[in-house]
Image: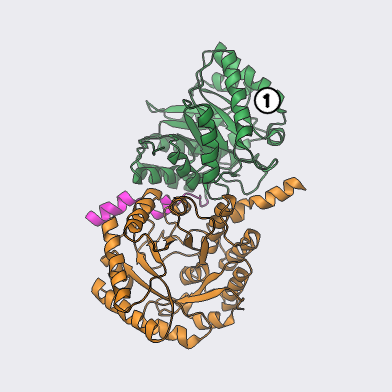
Chain colours: A green, B orange
Amino acid sequence: MSLPSRITINEEGPREGFQIEPGPIPTADKIALVDALSETGLTHIQVCSFVNPKKVPGMADADAIACGIKRKPGVQYTGLWLNEKGLDRAIANGCLDIIGKMSLTVSVEFLRQNQNVTHEENLALMRRLRDAYIDRNIPIDRVMVMSAFGCNFQGDVSPDDVLARVADLVEMAAERDMAIPMLSLADTMGWATPERIKRMLGAVRDRYPDLPLNLHLHDTRGLGIANAYAGLEMGVANFDTSVAGLGGCPFAGHKGAAGNVCTEDLVFMCEEMGIETGVDLDKLLDAALLAERIVGHPLPGMVKRGGSLSAKRKEIAA
Amino acid sequence: MSLPSRITINEEGPREGFQIEPGPIPTADKIALVDALSETGLTHIQVCSFVNPKKVPGMADADAIACGIKRKPGVQYTGLWLNEKGLDRAIANGCLDIIGKMSLTVSVEFLRQNQNVTHEENLALMRRLRDAYIDRNIPIDRVMVMSAFGCNFQGDVSPDDVLARVADLVEMAAERDMAIPMLSLADTMGWATPERIKRMLGAVRDRYPDLPLNLHLHDTRGLGIANAYAGLEMGVANFDTSVAGLGGCPFAGHKGAAGNVCTEDLVFMCEEMGIETGVDLDKLLDAALLAERIVGHPLPGMVKRGGSLSAKRKEIAA
């Protein structure tokens, strides 16, 4: 495979970050970050999640965030939900783009701890969500396999484990003649290495050669950017990322759980390798610094500290 | 190229970190960190630098550190020097392994700002160091090219720029029939990307197919571990690293300059990909946490937060 010439980034920092930060973060600050991200050239921004505010108090103001942002034409603003109730709230809110996703999890133990359901119950839930999407003319943009590279509760994951979940998703879609525009593999708990990325993507691509792939990578053990590079080497052109590295999964059973691979670090790497992202790195660095000011503590992204090379090149030329 | 089956790591954290930390760090703490590293399976530890204490006050106690450590058989303990005066101090100290290096820098402007010498003066200095090594029977373990991937003062670097410096070093060695055991390319200011690593290593290997290669990577813009992976893909089996990501280059003219790629994150990645390092990751994580306690602030390495997967696998099996 050769590197893609262009990638698309799904920014999940606002949702990821505001979900896990101890806070409370003022709603106006959450909106300000989304508005700053809107000016960077990013085209997909996940703004909030419609989840139980008792479990995720940082998202109790999801409705206010969603309706407070200044929508920029050409940008898709989405929310996250885990079940029909969340979907109903997102639709009732009315301020976001309603895009469906269906996700299954390799690790049944993670599913139990994360959502307190069995794999069979999760399959049934996803079928109900699928039907809701079809009945309400809601487009889906992807199916996802969570904990696709390993799990803190269940251990290593084989390509066959992942292929079994992908087959479940393909079957579910086929039952209602639903097309699958993209498959996302999520390294929910930071078990991926570059070689595992290649092996897993290779196995999926052997079976489903025409299915576009997304990677959702967490940086829990510091390999996020190397894993993203391995994905690029496999031709992956769609990534979930988090500005400044905001976030972490509150349900990963793991106090060291980190956020997604950092948006600006990935943009920097890609642009420096000649891969277009459509994102203005300098504006994105401003947004990353804003995120840091909002949460009030250092965030992991490195380029916001080290500075862009385009800025250095300008200094040198001047 | 295929991945190497085994790599060797040169631990530079103590020297890197104690050089740049505002401190003052008690000498006993510096010694305690080296002693902890000695128990991890690391075989090459750079302990201190013999540089001007007025410029680098954190290394004013270099002699006491060098003679205070508990030497473990099989481990090479080295110091850094930049000139004959430093070499004389290291020899007079008598407690370390005296191993010579010769380094040239692609960027003449960095050389001027860093050491206040011209390229020609640096060539002359290296010839004098070379002669001192030969005259005193000091083995050399490598030659280095600094700022081999780009420079904050001079900008981008081409393979031809690097090859010109390598040719200088090869010529210098040939003049005295000195063998070159290894060539190190240093990303002194964090300009490397995985693709630049591959292009540069490819160009060097085309010209010098039998010369073993080392990478000295700084994580200033967050790509350190991805660059290391690209190096592994090119068959590089020797890396300079820094425990917990300690350090940064005080002379890089850059407040965001970061330390070397983090030792335990590289060890983690390699071991999880089946590449032997000879290092006990759990002991190394203890040393990384000790480094963090010693400096009194968070250090960048991620696995010390996220935890090793071998530990997770044991928990799951239990």
Q: Give the range drawn in magenta.
A: A297-317
**Majority SS type along the magenta span:** helix
Q: Nearer the viewer, residue A149 or B180?
A: B180
Does A304 appear in magenta?
yes
Residue drawn where x is 63% and y is 35% of the image:
A56
**Given the image, on which type of amino acid does mark 1 rest?**
Asn
Where residue B284 appears, as percent x and y from the top left, is: 61, 62
Q: Nearer the viewer, residue B59 or B268?
A: B268
Residue hosting label 1: A122
Res. B155 visible in picture:
no
Res. B205 visible in picture:
yes
Q: Is residue B90 above or below residue A193?
A: below
Where residue A105 appears, as percent x and y from the top left, is: 64, 31
Q: Nearer the viewer, residue A285 or A137?
A: A137
Q: Is residue A154 above or below residue A74?
A: below
Q: In this view, does B249 lie above or below B156?
A: below
Where residue A239 appears, as percent x and y from the top left, is: 47, 36
In the drawing, does residue A195 fall left or right of residue B284? left
Subunit of label 1:
A
